[in-house]
Amino acid sequence: MKAIILAGGSGTRLWPVSRYGLPKQFIKLNGGKSLLCQTVERLAAVVPLHDIFVITNQDYQFHVQADLRSVSPTIENNVILEPVGRNTAPAIALVMKYCLEKLKCKNDEVIFICPSDHIIEPVEKFAKYARQAETAAKAGSIVTFGIKPSRPETGYGYIKKGGKGPGVCKVEKFAEKPDLKTAEKYLKDGNYYWNSGMFSFTIATMLAEFKAYAPEISRKMPQTLAKMLADFKNMPSISIDYAVMEKSKKAAVLPIDILWSDVGSWDSLPEVIKPDSDGNVKVGDVLALDTKRTIVMGENRLISTIGLKDLIIVDTVDALLIARRGEAQRVKEVVDMLKERKRKEVVEHTTTYRPWGSYTVLEEGPRYKIKRIVVNPGHKLSHQLHYHRSEHWIIVKGTAKVTLGKTTSLVHENESTYVPKSTGHRLENPGKVPLEMIEVQNGEYVGEDDIVRFNDIYGRDKKK
């Protein structure tokens, strides 16, 4: 069995922590590991690490590789890249082509599809369900996991099982996200389950269902992987639910009784982080006085609350969200407004991650910008120049290998160097510890797009 993690989503429902530049699957909500890392480790209880792959878009390639490397360097390159986003049905088609061509899988290979940003516990129970689904998939079913509902939730789609008792059952019907009255009816009925977005099937079964119900996708399957990638933009943008599951006679559901959350909004945070005795969820440096049933999440500074009830407070360096509990789904409206106004806060954090490390904007004004830059051991930035700015580099920790024009030198802690405008330069970390430095940019334009790359080990000099 091959386990495939879907990690291409932009995850803006948890704004301002989750943004397009660093979406939900890469953030650390309930501990020291990202949701993607937790997903990989959970799947490692089901299949060997080398059988776990992540499909994502090109913008997130290096985020994914960094997370995979943190779990095990042996799987750093287990990444399948979509040229453009086309929803889950084309993504699954691409996954199957990759497995057939690159991994030399046979048609009876079981594929397990899993989102990258869910929280599921306990792992041992999840692994038992996954193996049960694998058995049903080998028998010809397309198995989806149905989560036993704990409340009348209006934010999830539902699946109604067609049989009685535990174990894999035929799907009687799929239901869209309901209103509250309908959700209460589903909960009382007892045969409706939340649609988890996890699937198990053989390649042969899904190929047959694509042929029957998604011919636009099926017609592209005989192509080579290279041709499918080149033609991927012409794939229909459609979910696997709409393309296949809602039509297939092979759709089955495995009801599972387990702690599960897709952390779909800030309102769901108490599902994954235990509230204190006052019903508060506190993340970061938080002092709460006479505060009840309130979610407070901070990053860099002390947050004090007094006399509050039923609020959500999420504080980041450059944006603050305050909302009533129960209104968190409306964060999407805020994100849409920010998009309309072309605000950078919907896309960027003050800390931006790159394949070589990260940089944090400490201060910015007319004609200047100050950054803290971290370069990981053994990594290097592109050989580049800037037309509109000069740069001063002050080394805080580690050793920098600096190329200026045709001269290369080492710059140590508490030393500095100067990069004039229009001068080719390169920064490398040849050491064993992260290189940390302060960069002061000065010039008539300090935007990130004032860069000409001549050589880049990550291939960014080849992108148009």
Image: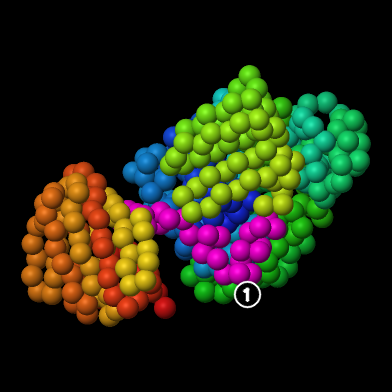
Magenta stretch holds residue 345: yes
Magenta stretch holds residue 396: no
Say what secondary structure mark 1 lies in. helix
- Front-most of residues 459 and 44: 459
Query: Is residue 194 rendered to the left or right of residue 410?
Result: right
Do we see residue 212 in this rendering? Answer: no
Residue displayed at 51% across by 32% down = 286
Q: Which amino acid, mark 1?
A: Asn
Q: Which residue is mark 1?
A: 234
Pick the quarter of the image with the N terminus.
top right
- Front-most of residues 462 and 339: 339
Query: Magenta span covers which residues?
Result: 332-361
Give coordinates of residue 155: x percent, y percent.
76, 45
Give coordinates of residue 235: x percent, y percent.
64, 70
Residue displayed at 32% across by 78% down = 444
Q: Residues within 10 Å of mark 1 (few under 14, many from 20)?
A: some
